[in-house]
Image: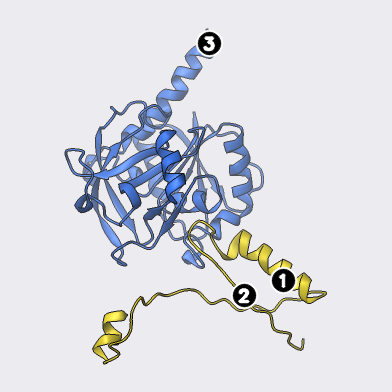
Chain colours: A blue, B yellow
């Protein structure tokens, strides 16, 4: 299988994502520039973290209107799997590919630390290898990570299982202390209605090696790899 | 900001909030045309309707 890592001017976790896929998971991966209108063949597209376009106007707002995002939207429409991390999550909400918005942290301060997130939907291609309610340790590093959705949308997300990750304590309890940015309902990551596009503020790609303090992020990438292995088996039959 | 203003003695200050102010020069065929272009820009890029409201004023300038 092959991953694509979208690179915007100002992306800075593109190398982390590329390194994890190539060197830790031994899968194929290519960078995809922001000015591309057509994609090659990819199984999964990653929108990495960073400060695309200097976060001018709103985080991810300019990135969301680049040529490559039209190609990403087409890819998603056809059922392609898209993973947005941090600034990539912000860009996906700005592009309308994910619901809600990310606002300035409740503390008004940049938050750079380890957090715990609980997997609240383990039936997506991104999370099948995680147990329901499994707690993952990953870093966050953002200033605009406070997830917001209006009440009616929030209910809809809950009803559809679109809340994929919530900030929790080590034992999986959601509370204010575990929430690094004031996100509504402790939401750390959501999916679109059909479950093929997800975004999260924490960095699974920076939690893929013991040397970095956690391997918990691997479950997302291994779920994706497993998804395509299973598909190939089915196709071979 | 609110506490800073209070520290300066402005005791009557409440609900301080920061917004964004954008200014641009636009070539348009009429006032109506300018208004419709501004609303289109506001809806598609300049504001995020999930979290922001906007209003605008138009002013004719010499080019």
Residue at the outermost left position: A171
- Disc nearer the start of the sequence (1/2): 1
The residue pinned by badge 3 equals A236
**Are the residues at dot 1 and dot 2 in contact (C-beta closer than 8 Å)?**
yes
Is residue A25 at all visible to an observer of this figure? no
Dot 1 falls on a residue whose secondary structure is helix
> Closer to the camera, A178 or A51?
A178
Residue sitting at x 34%, y 40%: A165
Q: How far across and down, in percent of the image, does residue A157 sit?
A: 43, 39
Q: How far across and down, in percent of the image, does residue B63 sit?
A: 77, 86
Image position of A82 (left or right of A20)? right
- What is the CA distance from the residue labelled 3 to the residue labelled 1? 58 Å
Dividing the picture into quadrants, the one containing residue A66 is bottom right
Badge 1 crowding class, 10 Å Cα cut-off, few under 14, some 14 to 19, many 20 or more, is some
> Closer to the camera, A78 or A102?
A102
The residue pinned by badge 2 equals B56
Residue at the outermost bottom position: B9
Dot 1 falls on which chain? B
The residue pinned by badge 1 equals B35
Q: How far across and down, in percent of the image, does residue B57 sit?
A: 64, 78
């Amino acid at each position: 299988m092959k991953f694509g890592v979208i690179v915007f001017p100002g992306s800075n976790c593109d190398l982390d994502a590329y390194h994890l896929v190539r060197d830790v998971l031994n899968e194929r991966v290519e960078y995809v520039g922001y000015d591309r209108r057509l994609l090659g063949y990819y199984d999964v597209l990653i929108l990495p973290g960073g400060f695309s376009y200097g976060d001018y106007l709103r985080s991810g707002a300019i990135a969301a209107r680049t040529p490559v995002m039209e190609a990403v939207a087409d890819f998603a429409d056809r059922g392609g799997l898209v993973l947005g991390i941090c600034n990539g999550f912000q860009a996906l909400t700005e592009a309308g590919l994910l619901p809600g918005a990310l606002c300035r942290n409740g503390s008004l301060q940049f938050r750079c630390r380890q957090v715990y997130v609980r997997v609240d939907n383990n039936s997506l291609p991104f999370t099948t290898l995680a147990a329901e309610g499994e707690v993952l340790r990953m870093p966050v590093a953002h200033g605009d990570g406070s997830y917001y959705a209006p009440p009616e949308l929030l209910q809809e997300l809950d009803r559809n299982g679109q809340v994929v990750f919530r900030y929790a304590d080590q034992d999986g309890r959601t509370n204010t202390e575990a929430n690094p940015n004031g996100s509504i309902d402790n939401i750390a990551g959501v999916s679109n209605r059909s479950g093929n596009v997800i975004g999260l503020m924490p960095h699974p790609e920076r939690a893929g090696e013991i040397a970095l303090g956690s391997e918990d992020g691997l479950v997302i990438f291994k779920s994706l790899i497993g998804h395509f292995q299973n598909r190939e088996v089915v196709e071979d039959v | 900001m609110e506490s800073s203003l209070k520290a300066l003695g402005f005791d009557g200050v409440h609900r301080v909030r920061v917004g964004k102010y954008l200014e641009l020069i636009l070539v348009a065929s009429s006032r109506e045309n300018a208004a419709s272009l501004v609303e289109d820009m506001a809806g598609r890029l300049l504001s995020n309707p999930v979290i922001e409201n906007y209003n605008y004023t138009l002013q004719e300038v010499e080019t």
